[in-house]
Image (cartoon, rainbow, N blue to C red):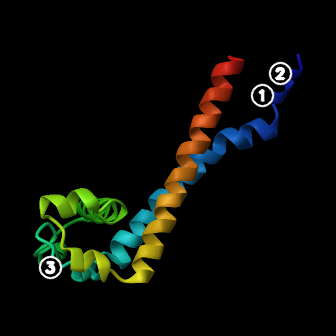
C-alpha cells in the first residue's frame, strides 16, 4: 500500500520527470553550442584532416547539420585517440584546442552522463516495483 502511495505522489512524478527535463536542457545546450561556438571550434581544428573546410560549408547548412557537426567535434574532442591513430585529427589541434571550449564540451558531457545515470536508476526502480 505504501508503495502505491509513493508512485502516485508528487515526489515520484518529479523523479520521473527529471530525465525528461534534463534531456530538454541537454538539447537546448547543444543547440546553443552548435549555433554560437561551432564556427570557432572548427577554426581551432583547421589542421585536422577530418574538419578541413567544414567552416566554409557551415553557412549553407541548417540546424540539423549544425547539430551533427557539433556532435562530431564533441566526440572527437571527448576521445581523440582513435582520431589521432587514424590520422583524422592533428595532435597539435587537440593540444591547442581552446580551454574555454574544452570546458563547454565537458559541461555537455557531464550533463549527458547525469542524464544517462538518472534514467538508468529510474528505469531500474520502475522495473523493481512493477
Quadrant where the image shows the C terminus:
top right
Snapshot quadrant of residue 127: top right
124 lies above or below 120: above
**Dots 3, 1 in contact, CB < 8 A:** no
Residue positioned 40% across, 71% down in the render: 33
In the rendered structure, which disc, 2 or 3, sits on the residue that comes first in sequence? 2
Q: Horizontal and vertical percent for residue 41?
A: 29, 78
Distance between the alpha carbons at the discs numbered 2 and 3 = 58 Å
Number of marks drawn: 3
Q: Horizontal and vertical percent for residue 56?
A: 12, 79
- Residue 64 can be seen in this image: no
Around disc 2, counting alpha carbons within 10 Å, would you say few (fewer than 14), some (14 to 19), or many (20 or more)?
Answer: few
- Residue on which disc 2 sits: 3
- Residue on which disc 3 sits: 47
**For residue 108, side relative to residue 90 (left or right):** right
Q: Horizontal and vertical percent for residue 10?
A: 80, 39
Amino acid at each position: 500500500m505504501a508503495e502505491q502511495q509513493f508512485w502516485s505522489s508528487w515526489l515520484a512524478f518529479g523523479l520521473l520527470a527529471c530525465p525528461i527535463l534534463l534531456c530538454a536542457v541537454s538539447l537546448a545546450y547543444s543547440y546553443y553550442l552548435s549555433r554560437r561556438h561551432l564556427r570557432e571550434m572548427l577554426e581551432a581544428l583547421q589542421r585536422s584532416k577530418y574538419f578541413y573546410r567544414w567552416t566554409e560549408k557551415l553557412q549553407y547548412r541548417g540546424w540539423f547539420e549544425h547539430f551533427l557537426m557539433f556532435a562530431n567535434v564533441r566526440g572527437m574532442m571527448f576521445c581523440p585517440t582513435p582520431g589521432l591513430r587514424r590520422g583524422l585529427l592533428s595532435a597539435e589541434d587537440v593540444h591547442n584546442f581552446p580551454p574555454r571550449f574544452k570546458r563547454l564540451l565537458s559541461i555537455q558531457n557531464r550533463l549527458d552522463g547525469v542524464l544517462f545515470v538518472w534514467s538508468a536508476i529510474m528505469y531500474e526502480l520502475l522495473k523493481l516495483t512493477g
